[in-house]
Image: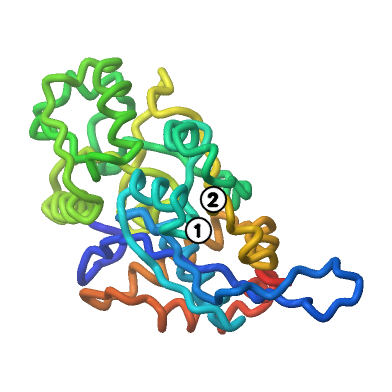
Amino acid sequence: MKTKRILSAVALGSVAALALAGCAGGGNDPSGDAPEAPASKDITIGVFNGWPEGEVASYVWKLALEDKGYNVDLQYADAGPVFSGVADGTYDIALDGWLPFTHADYFEEFGDDIVDLGAWNEDALLTIAVNADAPIDSLTELADHADEFDNRLIGIEPGAGLTAATQDNTIPTYGLEGMDFITSSTPAMLAELQSKLEAGENVVVTLWRPHWAYDAFDIKDLDDPEKTLGEAESIHTIVSSTFADEFPEVNEWLSGFTMDSDVLFELENVMYNSGEEDISDYTDIVRAWMDENTDWVDGLTS
């Protein structure tokens, strides 16, 4: 059992966020209908630690907005602090809100102080994944085969919605209380996944789609007949309650933003499977991809 692609380092998906391509203008329109130029050109995007799809989208928007004259800062934190930060204005934008399940509690908690601009991808799904040649195909079989997985279920960040769904729903539903549910970080989970696959050992991890790991590794999802991790979800853009007034044109661009899974997987693989080690800034990689996909990029701000 081998990884599909030899990775020199696990692309630890700190989910770096693409700021929004936003340039406000129109202050000279005598009709008064065009949005006024923003008082500030500074925009901060909150990016969830360890969520590649949000980092991909955030980098794209960061560069697109900087091309329009904005100053964009990406700030990384766990999901809860990012939602809180958008609500209190610490962050202007976040591009990784999952509905109707994973982040429903955060949308409810901060709903009065954030604005949902809609879904940009509708193929998101929480999963439990194993090596492709594992002896089981369903979560209903995992408890009886726990010893073959060293009685370990490898999770991600303790505060993630996926972690809560696994702890509160999946484990009790399928009788997995006898397994050690290990949570630390997405990079640690990916490192464990790669290590086990390279050693030819069974491994079971919490994961989600879309994620570059499905292209990089020979893995499969376990069936979840009781839907403990929910149905397919959509990934939403959220902004602060004052964002539309402060950045009206950027708000309009973000409201129309979509990225299908084919494009998302392609860019994830470009970013995280480059073979370079210890990458902390994907600007050059994303810029090169954007230069090769100008028609798609131009549509972000048209």
Residue depicted at x 12% and y 34%:
152
Residue depicted at x 47% and y 74%:
72
**Residue, far right:** 31
Pointer 1 and pointer 2: residues touching (CB < 8 Å)?
yes
Count the marks: how many?
2
**Disc 1: which residue:** 93
Residue 270 disc label: none
Residue depicted at x 66% and y 69%:
300
Residue 159 vs residue 143, the one in the foreground? 159
Closer to the N terminus: mark 1 or mark 2?
1
Q: Is residue 282 left or right of residue 167?
A: right
- Residue 280, position as x, y percentages in the image: 28, 74
Please determine whether, in this image, residue 240 is positioned above or below residue 288. above
**Disc 2: which residue:** 238
Please determine whether, in this image, residue 160 is positioned above or below residue 249. above
Q: Amino acid at mark 2?
A: Ile
Q: Amino acid at mark 1?
A: Ile
Please determine whether, in this image, residue 42 is positioned above or below residue 186. below
Residue 109 vs residue 195, the one in the foreground? 109
Residue 88 vs residue 300, the one in the foreground? 88
Which quadrant would residue 150 be assigned to in this image? top left
Q: CA distance from mark 1 to mark 2?
A: 6 Å
Which quadrant would residue 277 be assigned to in this image? bottom left
- Residue 186, position as x, y percentages in the image: 25, 51
Rendered-image quadrant of the C terminus: bottom right
